[in-house]
Every structure is written in structure tokens, then in C-alpha cells.
Amino acid sequence: RACLASGIGLAGGVCSGASPVAAAPKLSISSRFETDDLPAPPVKQRSELNLFTSSSGLYDDLFFPSWMGGTWAVTLTLRSFSTPQGTRFLSGPQGNRPDVAAKTVADQQSRIGKAVGPYDLRWVTVNRPDGQVFVVEDRAFNTKARLDAFAGRDVVKRVEYVEIGGANRIGYGDAPLPTTLVRYKGGRAVQKTFSNNRASELDPATGLWTGFEFTRTLFAIADSDLPPVVTDTQVVTQLRQGPTPRSVTGRIRIADYLTPQDQLYFEARQRAVSVSDWEVSLTRIGD
């Protein structure tokens, strides 16, 4: 759970469980890099969506700055890994496997300073009839690219967009949908990721773009009676164009949370149980 490749990126529900504690003060997006006490974002309600109407329905997504459009060679380097509430919250669904927590922590610490990539990621434009243009992630392309890159080999058979009800049944022309289904090679493993919340902010004074996405991912074996493994992840991304027009640098913070499946869910108080900080560099290779 500590570092899901599917969640890494210039980023990834079904609704999360009701909060067992009083709501925390709302953090600005950029301030989420400054503290490890990160409450899980609420599920974004329909009234909060950045909706744009079209003949084919409604549209909401994580919108990137215009200079992110195109295909990029991406390199990620892990800079730090922490467990804000202690390692026992990484001790498996029952909270009774300290060996699992120790292995997770050791594995993440061994990755610090090591680069993943370069691998290709892509952002596409969505054109409105009034002439406005929005840049969004090509989730299907990028999900496969990330999973393959972190596995170190070609593990994904295909990634499909999925239309479901509620806030995830939204579309605008041929714009990507926020829900994806991954089918892996060599077996019946599948992974479905839902976008529960997303937003961004641009600081005109510094040129910094900061965005977050809160996802829920279900890992399952097709045609199996085994229940799916459920994970919740918040990915916070901060990007700046430069030092050249064809390069972008930034940082990514990945916070993982327990879900109602986990024995220690209520003790975790819907706060992050692990936090990974990554440095990211991108070089444009195509428009």
C-alpha cells in the first residue's frame, strides 16, 4: 500500500466511508507538501464539480496548464518515505503483521535516491465550442506506462475507460473518462481506479501549478469469490515550466490511507499512514 504505481503520476471511487472524526481544517493544495498530517479529501459532490455542458453530457477532470499538452519523457526519483502514524498501520488488513510493515518500509527506503524512467506520459487537449481549451491527462495511456515502468517490464495487457454512474459518468466529446480498468498479462488480475476528488491551483506570481487527485483503487481476480483489495490514495503534484520551454520540473507527494476493510481504519482517523515524496522531471518529446 505504501507506493502504488497506479497512483504515481501527474495523477488516479466508489465513495469512501464516512469520517469517524470531526472534519479537519481544509488545506490549500500547495500546503499539502508542508505537513505529513494529511486528512483524506472528501468525495467530491456533484455540486462541486467543475462542470461544462455539452451535447454528450457533462465534463469534469483535473485540469493542467496549457504548457503540459503533448507527450513527455518522465523521470521520477524517490526522495523520502515516512509513516506519520507509525509502522503498525502498514501491518496488513488485520494490523497484526509487523513483518509486512518492516518489509514495506525497508523496500521504500531502499528506493530512495533511485530513478524510475524515463518513460513516456501524455496529456491531451479538450476543445470547447466557445474556443476554450483544457489540458487533461490521457489516463489510459499513462496508467499503462506507469505500471510497466515501476514493474520494470511490460505487465499491462490493456487499460480501458469505464462509464459508471454518479460523478464518474461524465464526458465531453472524446475527452478521457476519470475511471479506468486495467487488465494484466498472464492472469486474471484486474484493477479499477475511481477518481473521487480533484482540483488544481495556479500561482500567477511564481508560475507554479499545483493539483491533487484522490482515488480509490480496487484490485481483484476476475471470476473469483475472493473480495477485492481496496486502497485510497491522494496524489499531490506541483509543476513549473522550465528551465527551457520543452522541460518541466516539480515534485509529487503520494499519501496512502486505510479503508474500511482495514482493522485499524478508525484508529487511523482518515489520516495518511504513509507519505512518499518524489522529484519529477519532464522533457517534451512530442506535441
Image: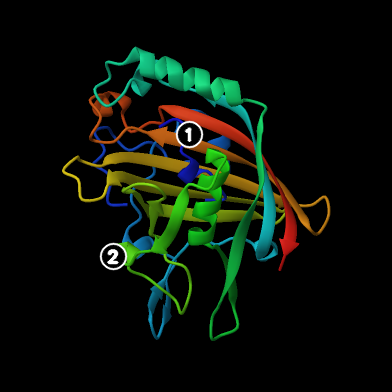
- Label 1 vs 2, first from the N-terminus: 1
Residue 78 image position (x, y, % from top left): 62, 31
Work out whether 121 lies above or below 113: below
Q: Secondary structure at mark 2?
A: loop
Judge from the rendering whether residue 112 lies leftward or rightward of residue 55; answer left or right: right
Q: Quadrant of the N terminus?
A: top left
Work out whether 4 lies above or below 132: above
Residue ID for mark 1: 3
Q: CA distance from mark 1 to mark 2?
A: 27 Å
Toward the viewer: 3 or 155?
155
Quarter location, residue 101: top left
Work out whether 13 lies above or below 70: above
Q: Residue at x 44, y 55 (%)?
A: 157
Quarter location, residue 195: bottom left
Residue ID for mark 2: 164
Q: How many residues crowd around disc 1 within 10 Å: few (fewer than 14), some, or many (20 or more)?
A: some
Q: Quadrant of the C terminus?
A: bottom right
Toward the viewer: 284 or 224?
224
Q: How many residues crowd around disc 2 within 10 Å: few (fewer than 14), some, or many (20 or more)?
A: some
Residue 26 image position (x, y, % from top left): 43, 42
Q: Residue at x 28, y 36 (%)?
A: 259
Q: Amino acid at mark 2?
A: Ile
Q: Secondary structure at mark 1?
A: loop
Residue 266 image position (x, y, % from top left): 25, 28
Judge from the rendering whether residue 130 lies leftward or rightward of residue 165; answer left or right: right
Asked if labels 2 and 1 touch by Cβ distance under 8 angstroms, the answer is no
Residue 228 image position (x, y, % from top left): 25, 42
